Image: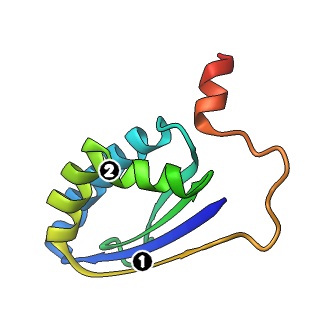
Amino acid sequence: MLIQSIHYTFGTADGDRAAALLVELQDLSRREHGVLAFEVARGSDRPNIFALWEVYRDQAALESHVASEHFTRLVVGGLRKLAIEREGWLGSPLAPAAGLATHSDVEDRA
């Protein structure tokens, strides 16, 4: 399991545009096989700052996400161009969660 955390800072005028891109990215990313979680938060007191918390089953799932059409369109062609600052890190959980269901697993059961 891999966890990626990314913080984006946008100009005040770009906050709402970034939010729209991030909502679409979150929705599409949650549908990907191997994405266990994909959460986006917007700063309450600084609405031009966003935090992403992404959990992938393995390296292959992360690589598939980065290779997706929506990542190229929304992140490479959108968010990164709008961002003033981007900081991120990738790590592994100290103790993997047992029985964590993926978004795909939940949809398959429906």
Kindly identify which numbered label has been placed on residue 45.
Answer: 1
Residue beneath the point at 16% across and 70% down: 82
The tally of labels here is 2
Q: Secondary structure at mark 1?
A: loop
Mark 1 closeness class: few <14, some 14–19, many ≥20 residues within 10 Å? few
**Quarter of the image holding residue 106?**
top right
Residue beneath the point at 60% across and 24% down: 107
Amino acid on which the number 1 mark rests in the picture? Asp
Locate residue 88, reporting x and y percent.
43, 78
Mark 2 closeness class: few <14, some 14–19, many ≥20 residues within 10 Å? few
**Quarter of the image holding residue 105?**
top right
Locate residue 44, reporting x and y percent.
45, 71
Residue beneath the point at 76% across and 46% down: 100
Kindly identify which numbered label has been placed on residue 67.
Answer: 2
Locate residue 22, reporting x and y percent.
33, 54
Q: Is residue 49 above or below residue 73?
A: below
Cα–Cα gap, marks 1 and 2 = 34 Å
Amino acid on which the number 2 mark rests in the picture? Ala
Q: Secondary structure at mark 2?
A: helix
Question: Is 36 displayed left or right of 12 in the figure?
Answer: right
Question: What kind of colouring is applied to the model shown?
Answer: rainbow
Query: If you read the primary sequence from the N terminus, does the residue marked by circle 1 or circle 2 appear first?
Result: 1
Image quarter (top left, top right, bottom left or bottom right) of the C terminus: top right
Of labels 1 and 2, the one closer to you: 2
Locate residue 77, reporting x and y percent.
15, 58
Residue beneath the point at 51% across and 49% down: 61
Q: Is residue 10 above or below residue 39?
A: below
**Front in this rendered view, residue 14 or 84:** 84
